[in-house]
Amino acid sequence: MTRPRPAILVLGFSFLLLAVSSVWFVMAGSGPLSGSDNASTQEITTIGQSRSNSGSPAVVPTPPARIGTAVTNEPTPVAPIPVAISIPGLSVETAVIPVGVDDDGQVKIPQNIDRVGWYKFGAKPGSGIGSSVIVGHRDGRNYGKGAFYNLGTLKPGDSIAITTESGEELNYRVTGRESIVKKELPVRELFRESGQEVLTLISCSGNYVPGVGYDQNVIVTAVPNSEA
């Protein structure tokens, strides 16, 4: 089966760049407390980071600047940041929290498993270029299903809406879905900052390994409705 992916763009590296190949997207099954009232202002859980049996959040080090930067020297288009996402096919309507990366080069996700995170150093939805990455928990040990629990059931043609801080609603249409073993993730492609605009949603899939997490990621790509 041909994998539906966005166009590949090789990324350059900033002077504080982490090795791209070290970025793993592993959202552990032992997710954080989903009822936390202050989760919208925290970036505690890290993709690729396991949690203790007590459920206490792991200590988060000061994050480095970013994963990568586009090859082009053209200025990044200005666009409002995303604040909410709606996926009617999954009955998902939730807040989008800006997130970064930790010292291990792993993308953070909100502590609250009912929220999702937008990678704030990458492309923005509505900017017209690049891959805007939004990540979310599949589930949380002892806390049930996360916002992206059923992400792998989306199919081409399904709709996704992003609301920005300016109140604008951006509408997308799903064009592809695939599950990939974590070590084979096309990281440079997923985080490209130029080329065709796509929305990239990532969560866990595959088998759960206690103390480690799921062994695969599900990746859903969508394009603006005007391009669908």
Image: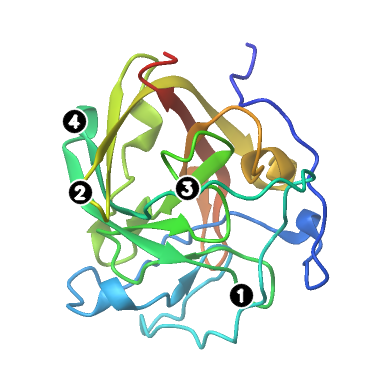
On the image, the x and y values in percent for residue 195 come to: 65, 31
- Residue 30 occupies which quadrant of the picture? bottom left
Q: Is residue 12 left or right of residue 178?
A: right
Q: What element carries label 4?
A: helix
Which disc, if any, is residue 167? 2
On the image, the x and y values in percent for residue 116 come to: 34, 56
**Marks 1 and 4, the one that precedes in the sequence:** 4
When the figure is inspected, residue 119 is found, relative to residue 126, above or below; the finding is below
- Nearer the observer: mark 2 or 4; the answer is 2
Task: Tell me the residue that label 3 is attached to.
Answer: 124
Say which residue appears at 51% left-offset and 31% top-offset.
198
Asked whether disc 3 touches disc 1, contact meaning CB atoms under 8 Å apart, the reply is no
Task: Tell me the residue that label 1 is attached to.
Answer: 102
Question: The disc labelled 4 sits on which kind of residue?
Answer: Pro
Asked whether disc 2 touches disc 4, contact meaning CB atoms under 8 Å apart, the reply is no
Front residue of 60 and 86:
86
Separation of disc 3 and disc 4 at Cα? 21 Å
Separation of disc 2 and disc 4 at Cα? 19 Å
- Nearer the observer: mark 3 or 4; the answer is 3
Q: What element carries label 3?
A: loop
